[in-house]
Image: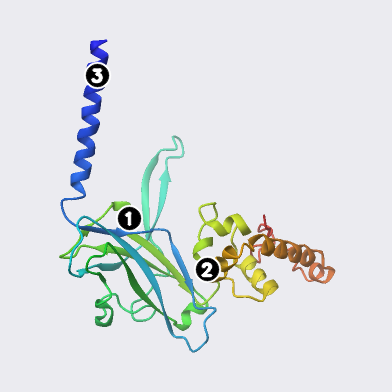
Amino acid sequence: MKKIIYLIITISLFIAGCTETDYLAYTDINRVQMNDTTTQSFTFVYENVSVTKDTVWIRVNTIGNVSDVDREVKLLQVPEYIYTYVRDPQTGQITDTVKTERPNKAVSGVHYVDLTDAGLKKFYVVKANAVTALLPVVLLRDASLKSTGYRMRLQIAETKDFGLGELKARAKTIIFSDMLERFYSWRLDNYTASAYSSFGKYSVVKHQFMIDVSGEVIDETWYQTILAIQATAHYRNLFKTALNAFNANLANQAAGKAPLRETSDPASPLVTFP
């Protein structure tokens, strides 16, 4: 029994020691990290043609002490990579890793205002007595966005005021275009994105169909509005009914438009609603 008690005490002291070490590691200096690292989408497609730039806001949180002066935060654009694993055909073990930079990397001055632009500097701060901040990323409506979605991988950099926070919370990607894109509440095809619960798997074809049926701008503002008035079930039923009618229409069938699919590929999955 004494041995068991001794073992329990030893384990407890070990756990307490680990907790203390982890705590000290993140309070030795002030640090900053992303509030949310989920890929964020943006599109100019709903904007008037006169709109040539718009802003995406990145929320950051601090770790450590509050300050009575403004503190500098810095963002960098960094490359993104695709990793392909080569396996031994006999054992299935990984023998090599091929690292390829992702295409469609956004270009400073073409697709966005440079992150070091003097006009933005005053906004790249955590204000005095604050523990969080919204940092602007100004996107430019270049003609290339009409046909291609571009990517920005944003990473927090150290400054004189802040070290780096958690490794997994230091970077996020913005995907933007002048075409239909996912909005925040439909950013993923799983239940962590609430619009997935309402409308199912995302596709551009489904998104356009919803716009055509409703005659409304289907974006984050729209979604938050129908949530607030508890109208998600109404819209889901509206879209399901319209989709059934579209697919049953003989003219649509004869033209090869029905049943409606997620892409133009005749083998792609059918568009459905929950």
The structure residue drawn at horizontal position 26% and vertical position 21%, both measured from the top left corner, is 8
Give the number of the disc on residue 139.
none
Q: Name the secondary structure under disc 2.
A: helix
Pair 3/1: label in front: 3
Residue pointed to by mark 1: 169
Q: 233 left or right of 97?
A: right
Q: Residue at x 59, y 71 (%)?
A: 218
Q: Going from the N terminus, do you reach mark 3 or mark 1 first?
A: 3
Tag 3 residue: 7
State the image quarter where residue 101 is shown. Answer: bottom left
Of callouts 3 and 2, which one flags the residue occurring earlier in the amino acid sequence?
3
For the residues labelled 3 and 2, say whether their Cβ atoms are less than 8 Å apart: no
Q: Could you say which disc has been placed on residue 220 in the image? A: 2
Rounded to the nearest whole Å, what is the CA distance between mark 1 and mark 2? 24 Å
Identify which residue, 88 or 197, lies in the foreground. 197
Q: Position of residue 228 (x, y in %)?
A: 57, 64
Q: Residues within 10 Å of mark 3 (few under 14, many from 20)?
A: few
Task: Specify few, some or many for label 2: CA neighbours under 10 Å numbering under 14, 14-19, or 20 or more.
Answer: some
Label 3 secondary element: helix
Q: Is residue 200 visible?
A: no
Residue 16 located left or right of residue 105: left
Query: Which one is in front, 245 or 226?
Result: 226
Q: Position of residue 57 (x, y in %)?
A: 38, 70
- Residues at badges 1 and 2 in contact (C-beta under 8 Å)? no
Drawn side of residue 144 relative to residue 208, left or right: left
Report x, y in % for residue 32: 25, 59
